[in-house]
Image (cartoon, rainbow, N blue to C red):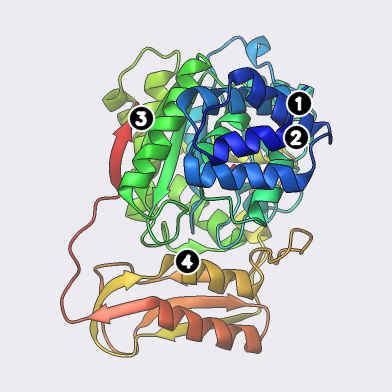
Amino acid sequence: MIRPAELIQRKRDGGELSAAEVTELVLAYARDEVPDYQMAAFCMAVFFRGLTAAETDALTDALIRSGDTVDLSPIGRRIVDKHSTGGVGDKTSIVLGPVVAACGVPFAKMSGRGLGHTGGTLDKLESIPGFRVELEIDEFLAQVREVGMAIVSTTADLVPADKRLYGLRDVTGTVDIIPLIASSIMSKKIAGGADAIVLDVKVGDGAFMKTVESARELAAAMVELGRRAGREVVCELTDMDQPLGRAVGNALEVREAVETLRGDGPPDLVELVVGAAGHLLALSDLGIDESEGRRRAQQTLTDGTGIAAYEGWVEAQGGDPNLDALATAPVTKPVPAPQSDYVQAIATTAVGEAALHLGAGRVRKEDAIDHAVGILCRAKRGDRVEQGQPLAEVHARDEETATRAVAEVTAAYTLGEEPPEPQPLVLDVLA
Ligand code: URA
């Protein structure tokens, strides 16, 4: 029997735990035999001392073993999945899934809800009337086989120890710890059953990882965990120093995703989708390389096959794919530029928080979401704006919340006489 206090002390003093000790600690925690206060102390010791690759692997494995895993092999194909560490305006999966499916590659994704200022794919999908995110595993498999894709909620039995641990970390200052983030994400991806995974690690103001160096460290840890579990993983580091695309907020983002699938998307979103699809198609069983993958992905955005795949998918999950079905907010207000200048920076977290205050996200876990509200960033970094021209547009439930959001979004934009240095969207790729 392990003594948690001894393991906490050893980690606190810079020692290493054996794989068996890590496993026992995590599984005992999952069985309620280790209390939250000891697990919190352990996480804090990890914050200061880190985990070795072997400890991180043991932690990931124990998290997976705390619950069920999904076996996608009955589909009989190589299955691909994608995950983002979370950003503002990140609706990539809603475009990428149909693009990949339209190219003939099965896409099976289990997704999460929004966290703090970052939105979650499930919340976005639930702005589509009728859309069901909770499918039984059998339904999930059947849909991937028949329709080519599914995006569903993770089940309560998938990596339950991570749910508990994440909740604990969230309130004990132990979220932003690279080995804990890597094992949390990869345990869910590995348990989700896909053979090949593209990870999008967001970097910048709106992301967990504020610097390219820390993002690279997280990426390397996740690629290694995937390799140890026999999964192919490609990790892209992408810019989150401004919202992705223009729309921030659930129904607004679905609308933008649909416009993108119709060939009319914002350039950064298109670039990200085509790049990620290139990697996924190259990792699939099609036997093509990345540049051919990109070419085929690009084609689905203009030949109607991407939007057709979207409609088939949404209908299969009970949703109405018609854009007119999406909720719209009763109050819209422009955010005028205070002077004529270049957009030098957009404080991305502040835009995410403004959307949160409008009701697009949750302050507490049990809060309901207003799917209609959000922000459209009309001007992006590097754009020239004239005084009075809209920097953005606020979509709100009422005048009061709209006025507050206009002030918040105005403050989030930094304008200046000089255009900023151009910044690439994809900062690095690790495989
Ligand atoms: N996302 C996760 O799933 N886990 C983390 O620890 C951080 C982000």
Front tag of 3 and 1? 1
Image point (74%, 58%), residue name: 365
Q: Are marks 2 and 1 in contact (CB under 8 Å)?
A: yes
Residue 151: percent from left, percent from top: 64, 36
In the image, taking residue 298 as reference, residue 371 lies left or right, namely right
On residue 160, the disc is 2
* Of pointers 1 and 4, the one earlier in the residue sequence: 1
* Residue 285 falls left or right of residue 270: right
Residue labelled with disc 1: 67
Q: CA distance from mark 3 to mark 1?
A: 33 Å
Residue appearing at x 40%, y 35% in the figure: 219
Q: Determine whether the residue tagged by mark 2 lies in a helix, strand or loop.
A: helix
Image check: 204 left or right of 183?
Answer: left
Find disc 3 in the rendering and name its residue.
278
* Label 2 or label 4, whichever comes before in sequence order: 2
What residue does disc 4 label? 349
Q: Would residue 98 be seen by someone viewing this image from the given angle? A: no
Where residue 245 appears, as percent x and y from the top left, is 41, 58
Cβ of mark 2 under 8 Å from ligand 1: the answer is no
Q: Earlier in the sequence, mark 3 or mark 1?
A: 1
In three-dimensional space, the C-alpha distance between marks 2 and 1, rounded to whole angstroms, equals 6 Å
| Mark 1 neighbour density, 10 Å: few (under 14) some (14–19) many (20 or more) | some
Q: Amino acid at mark 2?
A: Pro
Disc 1 residue type (three-letter) = Gly
Does residue 212 appear anywhere in the picture? yes
In the displayed structure, 317 sits above or below 1; it is: below
At a point 64% along the width and 38% down the height, the residue shown is 8
